[in-house]
Image (cartoon, rainbow, N blue to C red):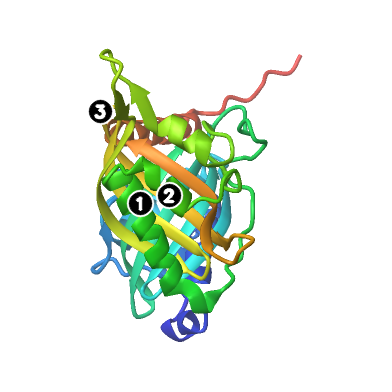
Amino acid sequence: KMSSSSSEEISRIQLIKNMLKLGIENGDAAAVGAVIQDHRYKQHNPQTKEGGPGLAQLFAKLSKTNPHVNIVRAFEDGDYVFAQTEYDFSTRRIGFEVFRFEGHFAVEHWDNIQPRHVPEQNPSGHSMVDGPTTPTDLNQTEQNRAFVRDFVETVFLKQQIDQLPKYIDGDELIQHSPRLIDGAAALKENLLLKTENDNTTFSIQYDKIHRVLAQGNFVLVVSEGHRQQVHTSFYDLYRVGTTAEGARCLAEHWETGMPELYRVAATFFIALILSSSLRQQSRPSHPRKVG
């Protein structure tokens, strides 16, 4: 197990990367123990038991399924580390992971994971994970956080769709949602639905913003609400840019949106993978007869 002094020399982001990569792929309990203390860790993922041992046990089992983990981009905001990840168990999945730290240990965890869309590229030719990964404009973190929060509150919570041009510069928004093409027009069309009475209603309802995390020009908004009347957790990552005139605007968007019903189903999906793996390992091997 890594000592506390060596843990202090490693950044929080690297500790999380090691835990997810080495823990899941190799079943490395030391990578888990370096960042999580069992008596302090609160787990919001229903698939995982509380504490470091519960997570280490899950990772040890997952490592036997020959998984692959790719940490696409990772950021740090005060006591929070947040990352976009790609997992390959028996199927490929895209997720966001959020960890809250106290000192050198993660004490709380949230996530949102959904299947990777097929085909991998959306109509504009973007995947769910490609694009820039390194934050810039670190001195603009708070201004970018406020800008993105205002966008989500105005357009998604208050449903003021006419305010989209205040935040998006025409077709300049690069869209990584598997359902959409680039630009404000496609987003507006996706948000609005026609009712039986030929009225217009929102297809997505954001009810509450839980937190807005930011580093430089990257901002993650964690929300909950409803998509077509299904209770859903929304994780939206935005890259903030500037227009030709120098005004702040939304330049790029990545997302996952996991219905709460599917989060329960995902618990059974992981359990099925683990039980199948354990059954295969427990089968007795019979020597092949020769001749």
For label 1, the residue is 152
Instruction: Report the front residue among 183 and 106.
Output: 183
* Spot occupied by residue 61 in the image (x, y as percentages of width and height): 44, 45
Left or right, 41 with reference to 80: left
Do callouts 2 and 3 mark residues in contact (Cβ within 8 Å)? no
For label 3, the residue is 229
What secondary structure is marked by label 2?
A: strand
Do callouts 1 and 2 mark residues in contact (Cβ within 8 Å)? yes
**Residue at the spot 53% in from the left edge and 70% down from the top edge:** 14
Q: Among all residues in the image, which is located at the extreme right?
A: 291
Left or right, 86 with reference to 56: right
What secondary structure is marked by label 1?
A: helix
The amino acid marked with disc number 2 is Asp
Spatial distance from mark 2 to mark 3, Cα to Cα?
Answer: 19 Å
Q: Which mark is residue 236?
A: 2
The amino acid marked with disc number 3 is Gln
In primary-sequence order, the first of circles 1 and 2 is 1
- Quadrant of image for the N terminus: bottom left
When asked about the image quadrant of residue 191, the answer is top left
Q: Is residue 132 above or below residue 165?
A: below
Spatial distance from mark 3 to mark 1, Cα to Cα?
Answer: 19 Å
* Spot occupied by residue 166 in the image (x, y as percentages of width and height): 45, 53
* Spot occupied by residue 235 in the image (x, y as percentages of width and height): 39, 48
Crowding at mark 1 (Cα within 10 Å: few <14, some 14-19, many 20+): some
The amino acid marked with disc number 1 is Val
Q: Among all residues in the image, which is located at the extreme bottom?
A: 5
Crowding at mark 2 (Cα within 10 Å: few <14, some 14-19, many 20+): some
**Residue at the spot 64% in from the left edge and 40% down from the top edge:** 126
In primary-sequence order, the first of circles 2 and 3 is 3
Mark in front: 3 vs 1: 1
Mark in front: 1 vs 2: 1
